Amino acid sequence: MSRRARNLASSLLVCASVIAVPVAAQSPKPAAQTPVAQAPTAEPTRPETCSLASLPIPPTPAKTPGYTELDESTGLHVTGGIQQIDVKAYRLEVTGKVDHPLSITYDELRCMPRIEARPSLICPGFFTDVATWAGTPLKHLIGLAGPKVGATSVRLFGADKYSASLPLEDAMANGNFLAYEWEGKAVPRLHGFPLRAVFPQTEGNQWVKWLIRIEVY
């Protein structure tokens, strides 16, 4: 073979190796699977990645302060009679004009998206309390339930028979949440354990305590 022929053959081999690399590199790799959004179920399940640490429950004072009086053990004022709720049997029901009625355990609530805030709880003419609360956005829960067309309002029910309602649009405001945590501990029994509403843009009479049911209507 002549020198020119040998050089041409060598060049072809080099080009072939250069071309072969990109072709091999372009072979599709298994793509990372993106979680697919699924329709909410009637019974939400705890994410596999959720890890729960127990929340200590602040002790209840031996003598319960009177209505609107200060609970010195927490710095919160008292409104309503304490309710004894078994957290293991507890369920928050979301019912009414929804596509997917919910029945949610305490731990399932704690595994949902969490927000924390330090709003003022104002009962005009009586008191203003400031504390750090944390819990599940109400918007998230209502979204899981899926309000039906024509639903306009939300009513929250406490185990003490107290209830409060507000427009659905207001309930879905980003700052509203259902608190299971107060100052890094469980919500005190005297102030709503295991769950209470925290609505920073409304007066304290909307912050339903010992929350057991939400009705969309």
Image (cartoon, rainbow, N blue to C red):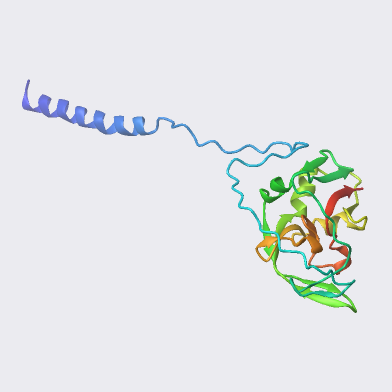
Q: Quadrant of residue 108?
A: top right
Q: Nearer the viewer, residue 86 or 166?
A: 86
From the viewer's perspective, tell me whether residue 8 is left or right of residue 67: left
Residue name at image x 75 percent, y 37 percent: 43
From where the camera sits, is residue 27 visible?
Answer: yes
Name the image quarter holding the N terminus.
top left
Give residue 145's position: percent from left, percent from top. Answer: 80, 43
| Count of marks placed on residues | 0
From where the camera sits, is residue 198 visible?
Answer: no
Q: Nearer the viewer, residue 142 or 151?
A: 142
Residue 130's place in the image compared with 42, above or below, is below
From the viewer's perspective, tell me whether residue 198 is left or right of residue 158: left
Residue 65's place in the image compared with 182, above or below, is below
Give residue 102's position: percent from left, percent from top. Answer: 80, 41
Q: Quadrant of residue 41?
A: top right
Toward the top, the furthest residue is 1
Residue name at image x 86 percent, y 49 percent: 213
Residue 89's place in the image compared with 183, above or below, is above
Toward the bottom, the furthest residue is 125
Q: Nearer the viewer, residue 42 or 11?
A: 42
Toward the left, the furthest residue is 2
From the viewer's perspective, tell me whether residue 27 is left or right of residue 90: left
Give residue 7's position: percent from left, percent from top. Answer: 12, 29
Give residue 28's position: percent from left, percent from top. Answer: 44, 31
